Amino acid sequence: QLQLVESGGGLVQPGGSLRLSCAASGFTSDDSIIGWFRQDPGKEREGVSCISRGNGSTYYSNSAKGRFTISRDNAKNTVVLQMNSLKSEDTAIYYCAANLKYYYCSAYADSYNVWGRGTQVTVAS
C-alpha cells in the first residue's frame, strides 16, 4: 500500500522555523516526484514546493522562494521541507503528495495521486 505521512507541524512565532517531513511507505520516494501543498479553510490548495526525480530539480512558489527548502533524505525514505522566516500567512494545513509515473514535478495538485493526511502549521505570536 502506498502511503505518505507528514510530521513536524506545530505552533511557531513569526520569524521562526519548522521542518516538515514526508515519510513514504510502500514505495521508494526517490522514484517519485514529491510535492508540498498547503490549504487554509475556505481557500484553494496551493502548491508550495516540489522535487523531481533524477536530477532532483525543484520548484518553489513565489511565497516560498528564499525561505523554504525542499530536499530528499533517501536513507529515511523521506522528503523534507525546511521552512524559515515564517509569516502568519504561512498558517495552513500542509500536505505532501507523490506520483510514481511522472519525472518532473508539478505545482498542480492534479498531477499527484498519493496524498498524506496533512500536518497543521500555525504561525502566531
Image (cartoon, rainbow, N blue to C red):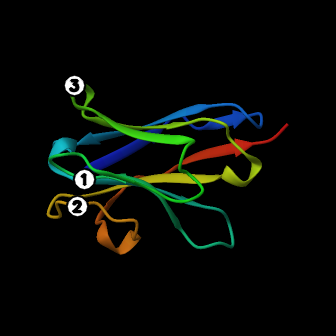
Give neighbour class at mark 3: few <14, some 14-19, many 20+ (Cα, 10 Å).
Answer: few
Q: Where does residue 43 sit, x and y in percent of width and height? A: 65, 72
Q: Is residue 48 left or right of residue 90?
A: left
Q: Which residue is mark 2?
A: 104
Q: Earlier in the sequence, mark 2 or mark 1?
A: 1
Instruction: Say whether residue 58 is visible.
Output: yes
Give neighbour class at mark 1: few <14, some 14-19, many 20+ (Cα, 10 Å).
Answer: many
Which residue sits at x=26%, y=27%? 76
Instruction: Between label 2 and label 3, give the one nearer the viewer.
Output: 2
Please tell me which residue lies in front, 87 or 100.
87
Would you say the residues marked 3 and 1 are in contact, meaning their CB atoms lie under 8 Å apart?
no
Q: Where does residue 97 sit, x and y in percent of width and height? A: 35, 56
Q: Earlier in the sequence, mark 3 or mark 1?
A: 1
Would you say the residues marked 2 and 3 are in contact, meaning their CB atoms lie under 8 Å apart?
no
Instruction: Between label 3 and label 1, give the one nearer the viewer.
Output: 1
Image-quadrant location for residue 101: bottom left
Q: Which residue reaches farthest top? A: 75
Q: Which residue is mark 3?
A: 75
What mark, if any, has residue 103 been given in the picture? none
Please tell me which residue lies in front, 61 or 97.
61
Three-letter code for the amino acid on which mark 1 is drawn: Ser
Q: Is residue 65 left or right of residue 98?
A: right
Q: CA distance from mark 3 to mark 1?
A: 17 Å
| Badge 3 element | helix
